[in-house]
Amino acid sequence: MANNSNDITGYILAGGKSSRMGTDKGLLTFHGEPLVLRIIKQLQESLNKVVIVSDNEAYKYFGLEVTSDLVKEMGPAGGIYTALHHSRSNRVFITSCDMPFITSGGVRFIVQEAIHSQITLPLYEGKVQPLFGIYSRNCISGWKQLIDRGIIKLQKMITHFNLKQIDTDQNVLFNNSFFTNINDKTDLDMALKISGYGN
């Protein structure tokens, strides 16, 4: 476990309506287990505490604390605010329930890099990845102000803070599929194919 992970709580965002999938993405079966369980296992290998942000009580099945979204219908922006507000840790590690290929090694790497910045995120192929990184609780007031102004696109929100971007293009911990997320059944089929399952 990373030395500076003690003041970090992991939060898995599972609050979306999953309209494109037609069901709750985190509860989809992936390799014979709920997709969110894969995420839980990777975070638990790296962090002392993991919490799920969701209004769906089915997530309590996994034995973790589940907290409801404080700001409804705001997607990941609301989920991150909920995590920041809920956490007793100084920093939170945010990830989504629909990223089947994240690893504990990737989590530890970002944790180790998260020093002296409000937000620390990986940069992959020129695009910052706001759903796999560290957010400091001192972002909370500014984050809420952005939501109140109707600014809820993560790529825009993060620019309002002291942001550290970690280039991962040449890092062996982050392969081509690492940041894959599943939005619909086509994505699910592709992810299964990548991992050696499916047709």
Image: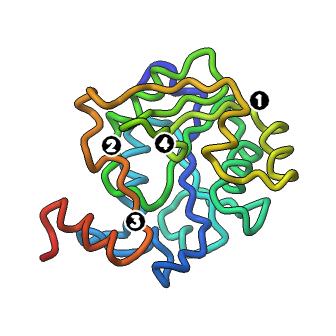
Residue 91, position as x, y percentages in the image: 64, 31
Residue found at the very far top of the displayed protein = 116
Q: CA distance from mark 1 to mark 2?
A: 27 Å
Residue 38 percent location from the top left of the image: 35, 57
Whole-percent x and y of residue 188? 32, 71
Tell me the kind of residue under disc 4: Gln
Badge number at residue 103 = 2
Mark closest to the chain's N terminus, 4 or 3: 4
- On the image, which quarter does residue 43 sit in? top left
Q: Earlier in the sequence, mark 4 or mark 2?
A: 2
Identify which amino acid the numbered label 3 is placed on.
Ile
Q: Does the image show residue 1?
A: no
Q: Secondary structure at mark 4?
A: loop
- Of circles 4 and 1, the one toward us is 4
Label 4 sits on residue: 129
Amino acid at the residue labelled 2? Thr
Residue furthest to the front in view is 126
Mark 1 or mark 3, which has the lower sequence index?
1
Residue on which disc 3 sits: 182
Mark 4 crowdedness (10 Å alpha carbons): few <14, some 14-19, many ≥20: some
Q: Which residue is mark 1?
A: 138
